[in-house]
Amino acid sequence: MRAEGIPHPPSLRDIGEFGLIKRIARKAKRKDTSVLIGIGDDAAVLTPPISPLLRGGEGGVAPLLVTTDSLIEDVHFRRDYQPEAIGWKALAVNISDIAAMGGVPEHYLLSLGVPEGISIEYIDRFVRGMTEAAEEYGLSMIGGDTTSSPDKFYISVTVLGKGSETLLLRKGARAGDVIFVTGTLGDSALGLKILEDKKVSIWEDERFSTAQPLNRSTSQLINRHLRPTPRVKEGIQLAKTGMVTSMIDISDGLLCDLGHICEESRVGARVRIDELPLSQGFNTFSAKYGGIELALSGGEDYELLFTVRSKDVKSFMSMTEGTKYTPIGEVMKDRVIEVIGADGSRYLPKSSGYEHFRR
């Protein structure tokens, strides 16, 4: 029996995913001059050994970017999703982390935990989708591991990339900066809702099948969830402008990931709902599945969320003309995140985004 007055240790539900990461990081401290950026950003940044093979532009040594992510059956995907789509996504979400640093993805490692009952054909199709993503973004597989799993299909991918001269981190936003995003928001979360509602048995990925039983708009929304597009070209462009003060990719939800920028930068933010970029499909179908909440906290859009100094915005927009970057708010001094509705009143979202262990 625990003595009265001695607190119980916290549970995973109490501290959540991000609390667990911080707890592990505190216990794993080790001084290493080769680690430029460690735990807490989209990718680690290392100083590589000096070698002609690792040299960057103009004779400099490009920093090495390293990121890893895992996908687990019935947490991140269902086994009856098309295996090609699962393979694509498993690599794409890691590529997105490299893009969020303004870097170039180059190599990857794949580790699998395979349960009994998964066929060779299934694995072949999974690898086909991953290979397609690798070819699309110029990556080479360099290793990995395989093992048996008691019941669930487990996927772990590590991606290595080359950093630019200007590293884009979560830290760096300042009060007055303008907040931007690439692409449109909420499509992935809406696609998942439609997928769960319609059941995957009536959907076929148009890239791997001629069958398209759903209409074009809903199929595109589902593809946004199952086959995300890492914004690598945009990340490289943003790094080259020299005007971006902070950046992250949107994996856990707009408000949640904006919160990471605010926490690392010690600032707050204001977001305006009527300025959020929304697709035609989102505007058509979202009301049934949660409306604007999907764009604010749905997650897995894998768009880039970044900040630019207000004095640089005009030059930034001129320099990046032709690429869709949408301003959605501004960085504030007070360390809170406000959401402003279309009528100008403060909007209180139901959730800030997804966090493992907290349900």
Image (spheres, rainbow, N blue to C red):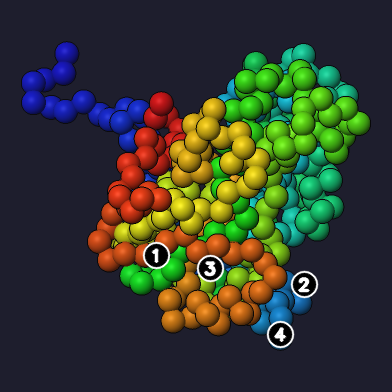
Q: CA distance from mark 4 to mark 2?
A: 11 Å
Q: CA distance from mark 2 to mark 1?
A: 41 Å
Q: CA distance from mark 4 to mark 3?
A: 21 Å
Locate residue 319, reporting x and y percent: 63, 79
Q: Residues within 10 Å of mark 2 (few under 14, many from 20)?
A: few
- Of the image marks 4 and 3, the number of the one nearer the N terminus: 4
Residue underneath mark 4 = 59
- Determine contact: label 4, label 2, CB under 8 Å: no
Q: Secondary structure at mark 3?
A: loop
Q: Secondary structure at mark 2?
A: helix
Name of the residue lying farthest toward the front: 343
- Is residue 232 shown above or below 7? below
Q: Looking at the image, is mark 4 or mark 2 nearer the viewer?
A: 4
Label at residue 53: 2
Locate residue 278, reporting x and y percent: 58, 49
Q: Is residue 85 visible?
A: no
Residue underneath mark 3 = 168
Q: Looking at the image, is mark 4 or mark 3 nearer the viewer?
A: 3
- Determine contact: label 4, label 1, CB under 8 Å: no
Locate residue 228, reporting x and y percent: 68, 45
Q: Secondary structure at mark 1?
A: strand
Amino acid at pointer 4: Gly
Q: Residues within 10 Å of mark 4 (few under 14, many from 20)?
A: few
Amino acid at pointer 2: Leu
**Which of the image's four quarters has the C terminus?**
top left
Q: CA distance from mark 1 to mark 3?
A: 18 Å
**Which of the image's four quarters has the N terminus?**
top left
